[in-house]
Image: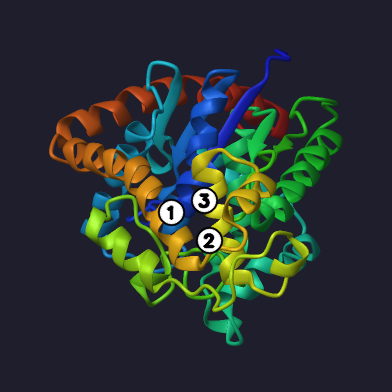
Amino acid sequence: MSKKKLVFSGVQPTGNLHLGNYLGAMKNFVSLQKEMECIYCVVDLHAITTLQKPEQLRNNVLETVASFLATGLDPNKSIIFNQSSVSGHAELAWILNCVSRIGWLNRMTQFKDKAGPDKETASVGLYIYPNLMAADILLYKATHVPVGADQKQHLELSRDIAQKFNNDFNCKDFFPLPEPLIPKNVSRIMSLRDGTKKMSKSEDSDYSRINLKDSADDINKKIKKAKSDSDPIPDNLKSLEKKPEALNLLNIYSEISKMSLENVLKEMSGKEYSFLKSKLTEILTSEIIPVGKQIKKLLEDRPHLENVLKKGREKANIRAEENLKIIREKVGLI
């Protein structure tokens, strides 16, 4: 068994990827492809745990691929494909459904959050979603998975499932126990309207986020309207602890400018938040507008995006089938 490091990550095709996705995940993906072998998957099977409009889902898959390419992912260096095009994901998910335990799934907090108070009406797919995530990772014997805080519990479950499969079928170390890759010094990007909530496409107000396809005028308006604070910018982090919206704007400036938050405060302390917003608008426009233009350009060439997925599927499928052949034998399937 190869001990080579292999990264797997999946992104849901929700459309309109935003600044939080860009800073929290996609820039990290580009860095990782320079260091390790990487597989990046558009997880359209995960998306249908809630009802999707078919044409919109297809468009969102292509937009996600366009966003991958526009931010610097290279299909010649990384495997890029959509999950449903490799049937091994669904096949291994069923096998792992029979390995995973109900008690494990009952502990998954994300299902409780997404299903809300009326969990009896949620889809079974939403409940067993973590098992499919485990299959995504283990199908390729990935060794490392980039994760945020909200997915760390699911990765722990993937490790538990891998360990149980190895024990149940007497094949020690067959599945590696995937390790989390948590980007160093990357702040969570929060809503521009509520600094206690993560920036999200699902939030009703479009003014809560900077979308990757926003125009310069959109960015300007959103930053101007972003919640901040009436006091001047302080010179220490402790003073910002009870001002989450203000802290969020400073964190975004820190991430984009590649300055530490401490140095940002040295530059900004004593100034009004209007000064920060002006500077933030300037660097956001410089960073995001070229990405948005490239996404729009790529979306005009649908055959190219479909070809990227086709080539990625072919590469992914070869690896998946090699591993599934052994998995079927170990389980006793003919």
Task: Check disc 1 and report the residue beneath it.
Answer: 280
Q: Position of residue 214 (x, y in %)?
A: 27, 55
Q: Amino acid at mark 1?
A: Leu
Q: Amino acid at mark 3?
A: Tyr
Q: Position of residue 38 (x, y in %)?
A: 54, 25
Compared to residue 140, the image places residue 184 above or below, namely: below
Task: State how far apart marks 1 and 3 are (Cα).
Answer: 6 Å
The answer to whether residue 313 is visible is yes
| Residue 164: quadrant of the picture | top right
Viewer-proximal residue, 185 or 202? 185
Q: Amino acid at mark 2?
A: Leu
Furthest-left residue in this view: 300
Q: Is residue 23 left or right of residue 221?
A: right
Give neighbour class at mark 3: few <14, some 14-19, many 20+ (Cα, 10 Å): many
Q: Tell me whether circle 3 and circle 2 mark residues in contact (CB < 8 Å).
A: yes
| Residue 201: quadrant of the picture | bottom left
Task: Check disc 2 and report the residue beneath it.
Answer: 249
Compared to residue 311, the image places residue 16 above or below, namely: below
| Residue 313: quadrant of the picture | top left
Compared to residue 47, the image places residue 138 above or below, namely: above
Viewer-proximal residue, 247 or 48? 247
Q: Earlier in the sequence, mark 1 or mark 3?
A: 3
Q: Position of residue 126 (x, y in %)?
A: 55, 65
- Tag 1's secondary structure? helix
Where does the N terminus fall, quadrant-wise?
top right
Q: Position of residue 297 (x, y in %)?
A: 17, 37
Task: State how far apart marks 3 and 2 are (Cα).
Answer: 6 Å
Q: Tell me whether circle 1 and circle 3 mark residues in contact (CB < 8 Å).
A: yes
Viewer-proximal residue, 275 or 118? 275
Q: Earlier in the sequence, mark 2 or mark 1?
A: 2
Task: Check disc 3 and report the residue beneath it.
Answer: 253
